[in-house]
Amino acid sequence: MSGQNQADHLVTVFGGSGFVGRYIVRGLAQRGYRIRVAVRRPADAYFLQPFGDVGQIQVVQANLRDAESVAEALKGSYAAVNAVGILYETRKQTFDSIHGRGAAIVAEQAAKAGVKRLVHISALGADSMSPSDYAESKAAGERGVRLEFPGAAILQPSVIFGPEDDFFNMFAAMARISPVLPLIGGGDTKFQPVFVGDVAEAALAVIDGDAAGGQIYELGGPEQLSFREILEFILKTTGRKRLLVPVPFFIAKIQAWFLQMWPWPLLTVDQVLLLQRDNVVGEAASREGRDFSAFGITPRSIEVIVPSYLSRFRAAGQFDQVSA
């Protein structure tokens, strides 16, 4: 943002205490922006305040299901980021209410508030024709955002990794206690794991004015890996030997039907449906420069980042050295 003082600009981050949101908040604070973190439970976001100077980060209550609270959180904002997302539904927090209607509400209220730049964090694989409610709701949210705020930048990351992730950490934890790991659908589904810090940098580039709005960007890491290859990497990194057992999709759906009844489900039927399709950057996005190249970012690989936080899952802890 050449010629301007970031301290003069307020950025509202919805879901700022979440996995991706906290990295965006940290980056904004380092750049000198004033930040308003809008979350459902403000007490859960106070850990963000040390990221900035005294008074630089303000935490407020807002709920994407409540347009009035969203409008209040956006007052006086120069830019806004919607980083709210859920992996499974609860009684009130449904895919439609958060990813679909909630995303449209943020975009609508941002336009009314005169926000100059809006970043919407969606997901690679968002598809209105998908059998997955998660993917369909993400697509519905994108439609609402583009209708209400045509200049918004929509980021579609593949599976995101980082110290707080629910993917690499979950399977590493499973490998610590289970002699087998499931290869759902045979383990052939391809992913393009992307580092959370790189996703945050892309969002920050839009807010800084260094990347164009009004585009859908597909964000993937430097490698396309199958589900089997990812589990093999986790086992190698943690120094464990476990049996990888192929589980057909129809059996995985049956198992997920029971698992999704847990308060914090390890697997849902909807997630099994997601695993039936590859989650990689499309050829059109790469050809048209709607990927990390648009931000001048060279994405980091799992080999560079993941071992630093999976070390705690090694047999003798983080000080155990795993031979190559």
Image (spheres, rainbow, N blue to C red):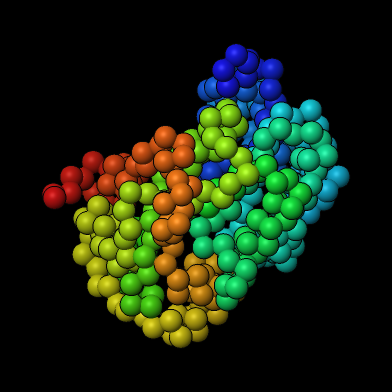
In the depicted view, which residue is nearer to us: 316 or 207? 207
Q: Nearer the viewer, residue 32 or 115?
A: 115
Q: In the image, is 221 to the left or to the right of 42?
A: left
Residue at left 39%, top 61%? 191
Q: Nearer the viewer, residue 295 or 75?
A: 295
Q: Residue furthest front?
A: 288
In the image, 293 versus 8, the foreground residue is 293
Quarter-of-image position of residue 244: bottom left
Residue drawn at point x = 79 percent, y = 28 percent: 76
Residue 155 showing in the rendered view = yes
Quadrant of residue 15 within the rendered picture: top right
**x and y, in percent, of residue 271 in the image:** 51, 70
Residue at horizontal 13%, vertical 49%?
A: 323
User: Which residue shows up at 80% across the image and 43% down it?
Assistant: 109
Q: Residue furthest right?
A: 68
Expressed as whole percent of the image width and height from the top left, the position of residue 5 reads 63, 15
- Please say if 107 is above or below 185: above
Horizontal side, residue 185 vs residue 91: left or right: left
Quadrant placement of the N terminus: top right
Q: Is residue 25 visible in the rendered structure shown here?
A: no
Q: Is residue 123 above or below residue 6?
A: below
Residue 60, position as x, y percentages in the image: 75, 35
Q: Position of residue 120 (x, y in %)?
A: 63, 46
Horizontally, residue 301 falls left or right of residue 58, namely left
